[in-house]
Amino acid sequence: MSRPGKTLFSHARIATLVDGRADLGVIERGAILVEDGLIAAVGPQAEIDAAETADAQVIDLKGRWVTPGLIDCHTHIVHGGNRAREFEMRLEGATYEEIARAGGGILSSVQATRALSVDQLVQASLRRVDTLIAEGVTTIEIKSGYGLSIEGELRMLRAAREIGRRRPVRVLTSFLGAHATPPDYRGRNGDYVTDIVLPALEQAHAEGLVDAVDGFCEGIAFSIEDIRRLFDRAKALGLPVKLHAEQLSNLGGAKLAASYGALSADHLEHLDADGAAAMGRAGTVAVLLPGAFYALSEHRGPPVALLRQAGVRMAVATDCNPGTSPLTSLLLAMNMASVLFRLTVREAIAGATREAARALGIIDRTGTIEVGKSADLAIWDVDSLAELVYRIGFNPIHAHYYRGERVGR
């Protein structure tokens, strides 16, 4: 990757995604000036100061569309093995709960993940990461949660950090020790939280491996009280929280998450009005995960109309994981969110850029094309922005830049 000190992207159609603009902040015949990896100016080309751009390298985009780099704000992309056999089982009639209670599901990925070293986890994950990067993704959130031991969780988080060093992508980590209960703690979730989850969180934080804390609040996972203990410790450490909530039932997880000022509550198929209202008041983002909805052949989608009414921002992510969403295309997730959940084109694009950044707590750094933010830019060979959501199995990326540097050729 080359890194010129100053670059002017000219003759562009720009979707800035700035807040408060119903049209995604579109600038026709626009230009973007990038300096030292940051956006130095953006606006109509005729209004960009010629003196500022005199010594810039000029890249003529010939009328192409530019959006912020895409952001995948919910993934489990670091893992060992796969669960293709469980896919077959679901096709033969087994439910998610039946597979999990029989020792499959998350626990089968735990065995495969525990068997790998940090470097092996990195190598196993990079092909998935590279697929996302090839679609213009410049930020990826990566969760732990398949270690379910102190060392296993730390190993996953170390692998995630290493991916961020080896690839031109921003990696944010979420500690997800409260993902499932390992067999030796079956029926003793409270003991598992005491013995493994909280000590692992403390150590991961001490090593600088954690950007946020997540949990799975569900009948087959952890209770409200379990999650409360986790969140109390996270807050004591100064870490933001988020939660897998209301995916299979309504335990009130979204409302709990909102009470802690959570960055996001994710899945939400069984969210009720009280939960949506609490999220709206707290500014907690709803992260919609159509890949899991699709892969599990669910029939009840998240209540998008309710979220709109409550003023809840909506993000879209792949939920890339080996069991319930083996999806490595954020573009496809955007299409699925619109087709399956009825998001508008503008909501889907905002959901994979601005609102995804908000769901990760980094809206001050990326997610929109504004002066002072990281020059994370995706340049598209499309006639209209709707094509980013409309097409299926097609990648219209022309080029993309991470922190002002072109990614790939």
Image: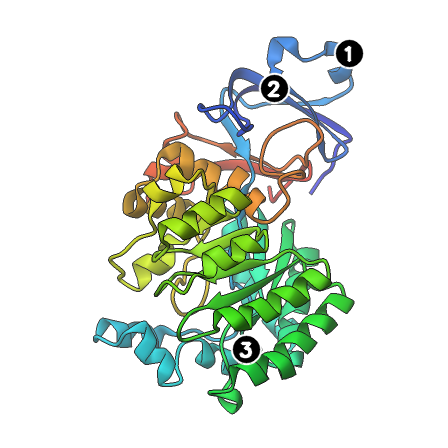
Residue situated in front as seen by the camera: 39 or 95: 95
State the mark number for residue 31.
Answer: 2
Distance Cα–Cα, label 2 vs label 3: 46 Å
Find residue 158 and report its horizontal and vertical position in percent: 68, 68
Find residue 67 and report its horizontal and vertical position in percent: 53, 32
Instruction: Give the structural element (helix, strand or loop) at label 3.
Output: helix
Residue at the left extreme, as displayed: 92
Q: What residue sits 72% from the left and 58% below the top?
A: 238
Residue at the bottom extreme, as displayed: 184
Amino acid type of the residue tagged 3 in the rendering: Thr
223 shown above or below 288: below
Q: Nearer the viewer, mark 3 or mark 1?
A: 3
Residue situated in front as seen by the camera: 301 or 140: 301
Picture quadrant where residue 95 is located:
bottom left
Find residue 20 and report its horizontal and vertical position in percent: 52, 25
Picture quadrant where residue 323 is located:
bottom left
Disc with the residue nearer the chain's start (3 vs 1): 1
Disc with the residue nearer the chain's start (2 vs 1): 2
The colour scheme is rainbow
